[in-house]
Amino acid sequence: MAINEAQKALQKEAIPVGAVIVDGASQRVVARAHNEGVEDLTALPLPLRHAEIVALTQASISLCCPRLDGCDLYTTLEPCHMCFAAISLMRVRRVVFGAYSPQQGAISNGTNVGLNSVPSVIGGIMEDECGELLKAFFKGKRDQHTSL
């Protein structure tokens, strides 16, 4: 499901990252989101339109709760520091991600400093599939830039 969301972002020419939040108790999907591009009109400014932030917002609304205790977040890319802090603040139980982000990823770069609640983390799930979407996107951007 997260990969399907990432493909939606790709169709909108946004960085292909998708996120899904599942209620751990019922195994019900409570939110699905993808990175939003500049054409999407939301209350969030563009730098905050990461798939994880949008999914956290949707899940909070869906569950009528400011905390997501017992929920699991699945995402195609290792969360950045901003997203991981939000995940922590919202008390997400577990984060499962696909591709690692050695330069921007919160887990790869040590993010538990100052966080009260750190979820369990599983990385590298379907890493090749998730990584290929990102590679194709950025290759397309480079090719587009060089043809100008």
Image (cartoon, helix red, strand yellow):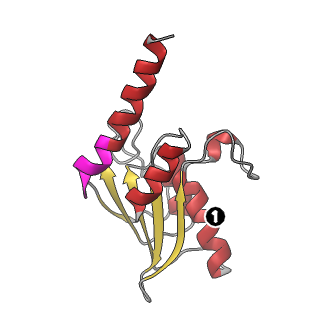
Q: How many marks?
A: 1
| Foreground of the two, 140 or 49 | 140
**Position above or below: 71 against 148:** below
Looking at the picture, how far across and down is residue 31, in whole percent? 54, 70
| Foreground of the two, 122 or 26 | 26
**Position above or below: 67 against 10:** below
| Magenta span | 124-132
Residue under label 1? 57
Task: Tell me which corner region of the image, top left, top right, bottom left or bottom right, holds residue 65.
Answer: bottom right
Looking at the image, residue 30 sits to the left or right of residue 99; the answer is right
Q: Quadrant of the N terminus?
A: bottom left
Q: Is residue 66 visible?
A: no
Residue at the (44%, 52%) spot, across then down: 6
Looking at the picture, how far across and down is residue 49, in whole percent? 62, 47
Is 126 inside the magenta-drawn segment? yes
Q: Label 1 sits on what residue type?
A: Thr
Q: Can residue 71 be seen in this view?
A: yes
Q: Is the magenta stretch mostly helix, strand or loop?
A: helix
Looking at the image, residue 129 sits to the left or right of residue 37; the answer is left
Tag 1, which secondary structure? Answer: helix
Residue at the (69%, 47%) spot, across then down: 40
Looking at the picture, how far across and down is residue 82, in whole percent? 54, 46
Residue at the (43%, 49%) spot, across then down: 79
Is 122 inside the magenta-drawn segment? no
| Foreground of the two, 144 or 64 | 144
| Foreground of the two, 89 or 36 | 36
